[in-house]
Amino acid sequence: MSTSIPGEPWSTGVARGADGAVTVGGVDVRAFADEHGTPAYVLDEADLRARARAYRRAFETAFAEIGAGVDVYYAGKAFLSVAVARWVHEEGLRVDTATGGELAVALRAGVPGADIGLHGNNKSDAEIARALDAGVGRIIVDSLVEIERVADAASVEHPAPVMVRVTTGVHAGGHEYISTAHEDQKFGLSIAVPTATSEHVVAGALSSSDAADSPAMRGLLAVLARPELRLLGIHSHIGSQILDPSGFEVAARAVLTLRAQLAERTGVLVDEVDLGGGYGIAYLPGEVALDPDRIAKDVAASVQATATDLGTPLPRFSIEPGRAIVGPAGLTLYTVGTVKPVRIDDGSVRTYVSVDGGMSDNIRPALYGAQYHAEVVGRLSTAETVLARVVGKHCESGDIVVHEVRLPADVRAGDLLAVAATGAYGRSMASNYNHVPRPPVVAVTDGSSRALVRRETEDDLLALDLG
């Protein structure tokens, strides 16, 4: 009889049989490795779809109870392929893109332009033009300069639908580099009023007397000043891998207050507010992910209370989960090569377990110090566990896949080893460092598997080299 690997951080489709071998979506990892090879990203389709439905239903229910509508956008930066874009759209989600490439994938998947958003702090003219041609539902403008560029690309007859991204000062997330609403970073326009009132006046849109406004207010006014633009609303994103919902509540209050201030100033009460994403997941056994129902109810209660205090009707809301949908649905399957015991400073021994991938297929441990969990999944072991570090094959001492994990003392070359919760940002941030081809992304469901993104080959790498 199969027994499930206990809950998170594994997808719901992961189970371990009596012989110790793991199945994912009903597919035995040994058969999977024989067919698709390793390393490989394994994506549990049913799990991903269920998480997409859970977020949509949780937020639709919670916001309906306060009389507000909500749209859920899948944040494609976490991982995007044609199949995944189709899956999430079939589950009722829209798609948020951050580059022209992501936009191209969403369009190739058949997602209607109206159900796509385009982000980015430095959109090219070509990306803006393509978004307008595709009829995207919204372009999130990120700077005063970009407001003018989008307006110049649009027309009065066909105004561009835009949201203004603001930074609320809320610092949330697992690492400084993924916390995106504090002031000292590249995204958005600050809600804080600057101390130097002579800077950042929008040429032709504001007088110098208006320069005491916050950059966010100046951005909103600049949009309203251009008839080629249609102001949909205000966008906020406070970070990634957030496990404390209070940050969302504080940010929502700040954005709704800015919305009310704009209405008092201009008579324009914008129709939409986006609260971003960043919902955290479990990466290690014992960790608890944010619950969609809980976060939806907490945020709904907060925005209702804020709107009541401000005396303004509620807008339509949107959110952008990415990691929370695809992260737990994925794992990376490796084959073990060299196993090397190393004595460390305190006199103990750490076993270095080298696999056939590494930082080229998951840069997050090296970049952020991100923590992951791994297990031997191709057989049963009754050996005692040892302190281990899973490392890759690259020419870097920082090429670490899992910093610290207990693995069976008899771990050996040829073992299949799986790293949990790699569905988000593994393939998206993958590289060809050391000219290592990137692994395939293979979907598993109902006992069958199929490649969504094929494995790269050396021929692919050489095809780009013009000699």
Image (cartoon, rainbow, N blue to C red):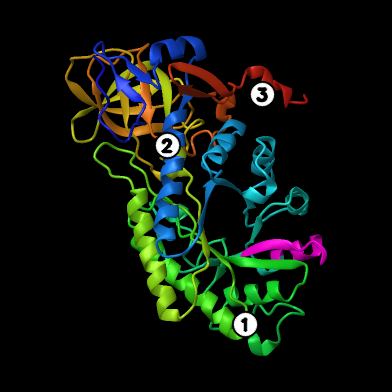
Query: Which badge, 2 or 3, is on the more N-terminal residue?
Result: 2
First reached walking from the N terminus: tag 1 or tag 2: 2
Callout 3 amino acid = Leu
Q: Is residue 134 visible?
A: yes
**Element under disc 3:** helix
- Residue 59 located left or right of residue 123: left
Query: Could you give the CA–CA distance between mark 2 and mark 3, rounded to whole angstroms?
Result: 36 Å
> Three-letter amino acid code at disc 2?
Ala
> What SS does tag 1 mark?
loop
10 Å crowding of disc 1: few (<14), some (14-19), many (20+): few
Discs 1, 2 touching: Cβ within 8 Å: no
Q: Position of residue 216 (x, y in %)?
A: 58, 73
Is residue 80 visible in this depiction of the protein? Answer: no
Q: Which residues are magenta?
A: 146-163
> Residue 449: where, in percent of width, then height?
49, 18
Q: Single out the mark in the foreground, 1 or 3.
A: 1
Kindly identify the residue that appears in the image at 74 percent across and 54 percent down.
128
In the rendered image, which residue does mark 1 sit on? 267
Nearer to us in this view, 376 or 273: 273
Mark sitting on residue 50? 2
Q: Is residue 183 above or below residue 366?
A: below
Q: Give how far apart the Cα atoms at labels 1 and 3 are.
A: 56 Å
Whether the magenta-drawn stretch holds residue 326 is answered as no
Please, what is the three-letter code of the amino acid marked with disc 1? Answer: Gly
